[in-house]
Image (spheres, rainbow, N blue to C red):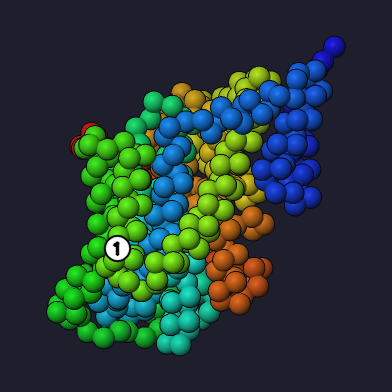
Amino acid sequence: MVNLTTATILLIGSFLVFIFLRFPIAYSLGISSILTVIYLGMPVEIVAQNMVRGINAFSLMAVPFFIIAGDLMSSGGIASRLVKLADALVGWMRGGLAIVNIVASMFFGGISGSSAADTASLGPILIPMMNQQGYDNEFSTGITCSSSVQGMLIPPSHNMVIFAMVAGSVSVGALFLAGFVPGMLLGIALIIYSLVVSKKRNYPKGDRFNLRKAWNAFKEAVFGLITVLIVVVGVVSGFFTATEAAGLSVLWAFFVTFFIYKEIPLKEFWTILGRSLRTVAMVMIIIGTSAAFGWLLAYLKVPEMVAGGILGLTHNRFAVLLIINLILLVFGMLMDMAAIITITTPILLPIAMQVGMDPVHYGAMMILNLGIGVLTPPVGTTLFIGSAISGLKIEKLAKSMLPIYAVMVVTLLLITFIPQITMTLPSLMM
């Protein structure tokens, strides 16, 4: 007779073994699901069926569109224009170039929706520029990597689309609105940290504020910034679905890149598209294998066991949300973001709702939490990109970022325990 406890241990244990053996996350999820299905005496086809079910959703079509739009915009000259705009607005302060870095990420993140794209696009511009002006390489790289997480919160964010699909009956428009203030709060927290460090280390100021320079920089960058308006206004007003807005953003990004900015030839479109499709393929296979893994977790009643375990310890809202955040932080260090969203949402979201947290609030909290994960070894994609750009070893970079991690965790706790930060905009506008 099949023992469900043994099957649970096999599913989770084999997955962890594959992760620590450095198997790709999609393979780890898929192989552990197949092994468990075989042990349970089920047909292996169930894994394939659930993989197809996991990606067979119209709303998920927004994900490849947002990825392609982000790649188009990051390749077509928008990054340098946003840096100029940010420099014109805030570069006059002490440590101004660090603040330019954060504000540029705030702008660019709202277009690409990707922490990795943000770092890969702005890093080669800003890290050498900061180093030349006397900023420490560790500080320059840490600020570049950490500020890129704003792009996961400030819409459009394909991770929020994935969360909305997995959570069910959660409005993508409400999630987009919910991400604005937390994304800006993270930026403000990083700016305060940068000001303190810059004053302590006597980092340089930029030129005085010049209104004409700011206006000219805005005129240059406005075509890229319109992307955010197309997506957010269209989705929130109900004029577009998230998928339709994502498709329109690709058309706009194509037009801006090749017919307004004209910094790259039209033939480069196929190279950009190929890079985007590789990213899309990785995200989709992770979502598919995560769906199969998640189905097995539900079959084995793991969500009920986890809920019972957490609520058996305490029903205190503060303690429960701390435990959920801790679980997500640990997962974020080990797994890809899309996989964590797909697997843990059906388990942890109901627990959060039992202690009074709105699903939209939970989504914003989760995205920021997992954003910290992309900056932490051993799987921190954004951290590896920053390391490659700056030439710093991962260990040295991660150690230098400890104060930044602390700033981000404090921001996460504020967003977790002050619902108004997240929920005010959705409540007012939807």
Q: Where residue 78 sits: x, y (%)? A: 34, 68
Residue type pointed to by label 1:
Val
The image quadrant where one finds the N terminus is: top right
Whether 299 is drawn above or below 275: the answer is above
Q: Is residue 193 visible?
A: no
Circle 1 crowding by C-alpha within 10 Å: few under 14, some 14–19, many from 20: many
Q: Nearest the camera: 220 or 377?
A: 220
Instruction: From the image, tell me which residue sits under label 1.
Output: 256
Count of numbered labels shown in the rendering: 1
**Going by the image, does 294 lie left or right of 202?**
right
**Residue 270's x, y, as percent?**
48, 60
Residue at point 21%, 70% (across, down) = 218
Q: Residue at x 76, y 18 (%)?
A: 42
| Residue sitting at x 51%, y 81% | 136
Q: Position of residue 371 (x, y in %)?
A: 50, 52
Question: Can you give x and y, in whole percent of width and height, for residue 277 in the image?
Answer: 53, 52
Determine if residue 32 is in view: yes
Residue 53 sits in quarter: top right
| Residue at the outermost front position | 267
For this view, does 82 lie left or right of residue 6?
left
Give the residue displayed 33% in from the left and 78% down from the top: 96
The correct choice, above or below, for 390 with respect to 382 in the image is: below
Q: Residue furthest right?
A: 1
Q: Nearer the viewer, residue 429 or 410?
A: 429
Q: Is residue 312 left or right of residue 237?
A: right
**Rendered view: 215 above or below 367:** below
**Helix, strand or loop status at disc 1:** helix
